[in-house]
Amino acid sequence: MNGTTTYQQSPCPANQARKEPTLQELNDAEKKRKASAAISSASAASANAVAPSLAPARATGFHCDGRQHCSQMTSCAEAKQFLANCPGVKMDGDRNGIPCEKQWCSR
């Protein structure tokens, strides 16, 4: 009331006894929690779809991790994966679809 904060070890005294939740109320609360978690999970999945750099690679084992240049690659297959799936890569200077022609993917 006067703008001060006080701390105490025990809870404030209550004028009424606390009503214990019913099984139905507990189940409803759990359903809401799970629904909220599912929505959060779906939102995260859609964010990964929008930002491929955050999405893991499928069966290839590669994933977008911020590398952009041929000097950061370890193979032609890796360079092709990055060129096809990752935004902002700088591995195809002549824009012919073949990345890292001097380092990894020579004709």
Image (spheres, helix red, strand yellow):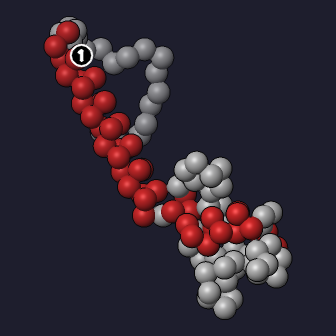
Q: Is residue 79 left or right of residue 1?
A: right
Residue wearing tag 1: 26
28 shown above or below 5: above
Picture quadrant where residue 21 is located: top left
Q: Nearer the viewer, residue 84 or 18?
A: 84
Q: SS class of the residue under badge 1?
A: helix
Q: Is residue 16 left or right of residue 9?
A: left
Which quadrant of the figure contains the C terminus?
bottom right
Query: Horizontal and vertical percent for residue 98?
Result: 66, 79
Q: Nearer the viewer, residue 76 or 5?
A: 76
Which quadrant of the figure contains the N terminus?
top left
Q: Nearer the viewer, residue 50 or 97?
A: 97
Classify mark 1: residues with Cα within 10 Å, few (<14), some (14-19) or many (20+).
few
Query: Horizontal and vertical percent for residue 63?
Result: 62, 56
Q: Is residue 31 left or right of residue 37?
A: left
Q: Residue at x 76, y 74 (%)?
A: 105
Which amino acid, mark 1?
Leu
Q: Is residue 90 visible?
A: no
Q: Is residue 40 visible?
A: yes
